[in-house]
Image (spheres, rainbow, N blue to C red):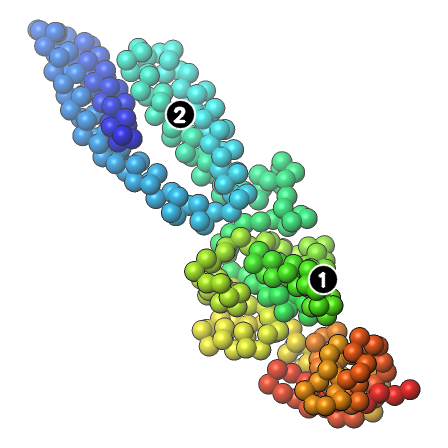
Amino acid sequence: MIVEIVRLLITLALTAVGYRTGLAVHAANPDTAQVLGAILGAGTGYVLGGVLGRRFHSSLEDMPKVVVPRSSGPELFAGAFGLVVGMFVGLVVGLPLIIFLPPEIWLPLAVLVVVVFSIAGARLFSGRADEILAATGLRRRGGLVTRSLDASGYLLDSSAAIDGRVLNLARLGLLRGRLWIPEFVIDELQGLADAKDQDRRRRGRRGLDVLEALRDVQGSDVAVLEETVPEFEDVDAKLIVVAGRAEASLVTTDHNLAKAAAARGINVVNPQVLADALKVPVATGDHLHVRVSRAGSEPGQGVAFLDDGTMVVVEDAAELVGSEIDVEITATTRTAVGRMLFGRQVS
């Protein structure tokens, strides 16, 4: 149907042009010249209209499969706005056609002009979604620009957000480039923040607070990523796929995720490894103030965590879950996932 409409418009326009051309030719038989001009224009318009119509129809069919899944909500909104603006501009540009051309010529040409300007406006505005939303004062997620990943940068994992040291890296200007926060990571943190378990709830809220603080860092370029990767349900798998597609660096403190990403050739930034390499280690005999979050694997043991995620195993603290205590470090060890401290309660 669309092909036939485009073909009809172009055929009518070129038929009118051919007829007018034959009328302007001072031939011995002007009537024959007009008819031949109209026939030649109609034939050309029919062939050309069919080609252009099929290309236009193919583009429209591919749009929901290609454009929509790769476009974020703001880009679609900006594209719709650009469509309206382009339509208006096309009407203005088409006015001279109405004035200087006869109706049989200007009508199909004006329709084509409006269609072309509408499509051009939609493509232009969708490509400038960030600027358009900023100009209209529309923002998402508390000021974070929301869009699809179209450039390399840093992809943030929930473990790095909970860890919090990515905030210090951003403040120091060590993350050069855009920092992407996937929506499925935000949803994961929201789920933790709404959990019944107090420790999980605290970790989720801490991660959300870090995300909120990242956008306030001067000079930072933070954006929410709307790519959902529906073919995978696991968040780690989604992160690996997105980072691989965009050649982005993955920021995570999850040891297993870091190893899986590195095995696939993805650059990994682990704030925990960086911090461990720079900070003065906790030594035997140091005193720490910790909160016992759960019982340990051995009878009588309690487990606490430092703010950086370091595990502290406390002797005879299984009955102190939920309590804050002072601990003296009695031993330290390093595992594949980082440091582990052992201690006992002190008065």
The residue closer to the viewer here, 175 or 347, is: 347
Q: Residue 97 falls in which quadrant of the image?
A: top left
Instruction: Evaluate whether residue 19 shows in this view.
Output: yes
- Left or right of 71: which side holds 213? right
Three-letter residue code for mark 1: Arg
Three-letter residue code for mark 2: Val
Q: Residue at x 53, y 38 (%)?
A: 77
Q: Which residue is mark 2?
A: 114
The residue closer to the viewer here, 296 or 76, is: 296
Q: Residue at x 65, y 49 (%)?
A: 141
- Quarter of the image for the N terminus: give it: top left
- Left or right of 115: which side holds 336? right
Is disc 2 placed on a helix, strand or loop?
A: helix
Q: Is residue 228 above or below residue 86?
A: below
Disc 1 crowd, CA 10 A, few/some/many (<14, 14-19, 20+): some
Q: Which residue is mark 1?
A: 205
- Quarter of the image for the C terminus: give it: bottom right
Residue 259 percent across, percent down from the top left: 52, 78
Pointer 1 or 2: first along the chain:
2
Disc 2 crowd, CA 10 A, few/some/many (<14, 14-19, 20+): many
Residue 13 percent across, percent down from the top left: 26, 19
Q: Is residue 1 above or below residue 189?
A: above
